[in-house]
Image: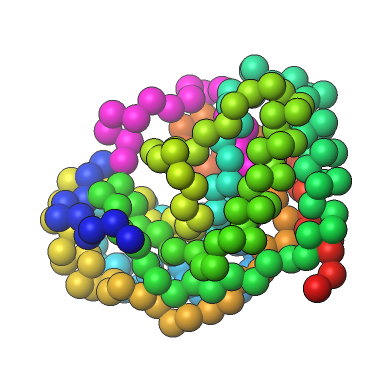
């Protein structure tokens, strides 16, 4: 776990983002349709209602970023469908994964839920990496780190301010709950991140049985 930040910063102040009409392809584990995930987000929002400079993602798009594929203008529609077909075949015998969310982790740009355990999620990500590489020849990447750390961001920072009052108000954890990962979705994210102009292209489902 990273040390607690002393200050929150504006995530988007110096961040290069797609322009209007430009898109970026991502693989996401979408969890916004699950009541427990929404409950966790609402708890965080209620505890931080008195603070400004915080950006709350739409509940429907709560997610675990799995892979950043690249700009949509570099990846054809055929390649996108090939990715989905291969990923679906690789994940067809993998059972849905139950994970626990309760611990909060803080970054100067965001506040997120830590996801545990991670080992089965890493196996899913490896399948997504394989499908992406086979279809596109592109090397994948994740934002900000070479090591994938599964997390669901609840709040983004869009202002410079001390972190301690926010951490004191929100705490280090929320009531424990379980979330089920049963698919990975290929999403076209269009324009700047904060617009949340997301267009799901298709899902690779985890269809195995325990």
Color theme of the render: rainbow
Q: What is the number of callouts on the image? A: 0
Quarter in which the C terminus is drawn: bottom right
Q: Residue at x 70, y 33 (%)?
A: 132
Residue 144 image offset from top left, x and y in percent: 39, 38
Q: Nearer the viewer, residue 100 or 71?
A: 100
Q: In the rendered image of this protein, does residue 58 appear above or below residue 43?
A: above
- The answer to whether residue 45 is left or right of residue 68 is left
Q: Residue at x 52, y 33 (%)?
A: 141
Q: Quadrant of the N terminus?
A: bottom left
Q: Which portion, as a residue range, is magenta? A: 11-30
Taking depth in this image into account, of 161 and 164 the one nearest to the observer is 164
Residue 184 appears at what percent x and percent y?
A: 69, 50
Q: Magenta stretch containing residue 43, yes or no?
A: no
Residue depicted at 25% across the width and 49% down the height: 108
**Percent position of residue 161, x then y:** 15, 51
Q: Is residue 91 visible?
A: yes
Q: Position of residue 30 (x, y in %)?
A: 63, 55
Residue at the image point whose x is 30% and y is 68% from the top: 49
Most common secondary structure along the magenta stretch: loop
From the viewer's perspective, is 109 left or right of 174?
A: left
Which quadrant would residue 67 be assigned to in this image? top right
Query: Left or right: where does residue 185 sit relative to residue 93?
Result: left
Displayed quadrant of residue 45: bottom left
Q: Is residue 60 visible?
A: no
The reply to whether the magenta stretch includes residue 21 is: yes
Compared with 174, 106 (above or below) is above
């Amino acid at each position: 776990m990273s040390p607690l930040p002393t200050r929150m910063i504006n995530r988007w102040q110096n961040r290069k983002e797609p322009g209007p009409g430009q898109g970026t392809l991502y693989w996401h584990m979408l969890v916004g349709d699950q009541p427990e995930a929404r409950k966790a987000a609402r708890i965080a929002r209620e505890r931080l209602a008195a603070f400004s400079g915080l950006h709350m993602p739409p509940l429907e798009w709560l997610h675990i970023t799995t892979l950043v594929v690249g700009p949509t203008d570099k990846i054809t529609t055929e390649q996108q469908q090939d990715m989905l077909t291969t990923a679906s075949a690789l994940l067809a015998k993998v059972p849905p994964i139950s994970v626990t969310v309760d611990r909060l982790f803080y970054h100067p740009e965001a506040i997120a839920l830590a996801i545990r355990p991670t080992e089965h999620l890493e196996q899913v990500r490896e399948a997504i990496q394989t499908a992406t590489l086979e279809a596109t020849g592109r090397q994948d990447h994740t934002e900000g780190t070479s090591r994938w750390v599964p997390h669901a961001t609840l709040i983004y920072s869009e202002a410079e301010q001390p972190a301690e009052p926010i951490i004191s108000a929100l705490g280090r954890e929320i009531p424990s709950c379980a979330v089920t990962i049963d698919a990975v979705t290929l999403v076209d994210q269009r324009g700047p991140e904060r617009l949340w102009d997301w267009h799901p292209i298709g899902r690779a489902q985890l269809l195995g049985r325990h």
